[in-house]
Amino acid sequence: MAIIQDDKTLLSLYRDPATREKGFTYIIQKYQERLYWHVRRLVLDHDDANDVLQNVFVKVWKNLEGFREDAQLYTWLYKIATNECLTFLEKQKKNTSVSLSDVETGLSNTLKADSQFDANKLEWKLQRAILGLPEKQRIVFNLRYYDEMPYEEMSRVLDTSEGALKASYHHAVKKIEEFIKNS
C-alpha cells in the first residue's frame, strides 16, 4: 500500500476516531526512517536509537491531537526526536555519574566497535570529528548536513535564532575540517 504523502490528509485520518490508528501508522511509515537516522546520528547505537524512537512515537501518539500545525509536521516530529535524544544522553550521563566528556568517549567507543569501522576512511573520520563537537553544534551540524534542514525549520526545532544556528554550524564545520586535516 502506498504511503500517503500529504500531511493534512494524514492528520485528518488521525483525528477521525474511525481511522486514527491507520493515520498514525501512515505517519510512522512516512517519517520513521528519517527520524531513525536523525536519532541514530545523535545516540549512535542501533538499539538505543530504536528505544529513543519508540519513545518519540509514544509522545507523538499522546500529543498529536494537540498539534496546532503552526509548523510542518516533520518539524514538530524532529523537535520531539531531538528532545528525546537530549533526554536519553542526559540520563546516560546521570546514570553513569560521569562527565560529558566521558559520555562522548563512550559514544566514540561505540563508533569504534562497529564492525565496519576503519579509522583511515573519510566517513569514519567525519563521524569521529562530529563526536568531538559540543552537543549543540553536533545537533546543528547533523540537522543541516545530513537532513538538509533549512535554518528556519531548525530554529523551530531547537528554539534558537537562525543567526545562532548559522554561527554554530560554521564553527562546527571549521572544527570538523581541522580534525580531518590533522588526523
Image (cartoon, grey):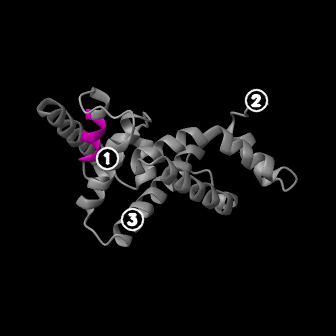
Q: Secondary structure at mark 3?
A: helix
Residue bearing mark 2: 2
Q: Amino acid at mark 2?
A: Ala
Q: Give how far across and how far down residue 92 sits, in percent.
A: 39, 65
Horizontal placement of 11 versus 41: left or right? right
Q: Secondary structure at mark 2?
A: loop
> What span is in magenta?
125-132
Q: Estimate the spatial distance between the alpha carbons at disc 3 and disc 2, rounded to whole Å.
A: 38 Å
Mark 1 near mark 3, Cβ–Cβ under 8 Å?
A: no
Residue bearing mark 1: 138
Using a 10 Å C-alpha cutoff, classify the residue at mark 1 as few (fewer than 14 neighbours), some (14 to 19) or many (20 or more). Answer: many
Q: Secondary structure at mark 1?
A: helix
Residue at left offset 28%, top offset 46%: 131
Q: State which quadrant residue 34 falls in.
A: top right
Residue at left offset 31%, top offset 53%: 136
Q: Amino acid at mark 3?
A: Gln
Observer-side mark, 3 or 2, equals 3
Observer-side mark, 1 or 3, equals 3
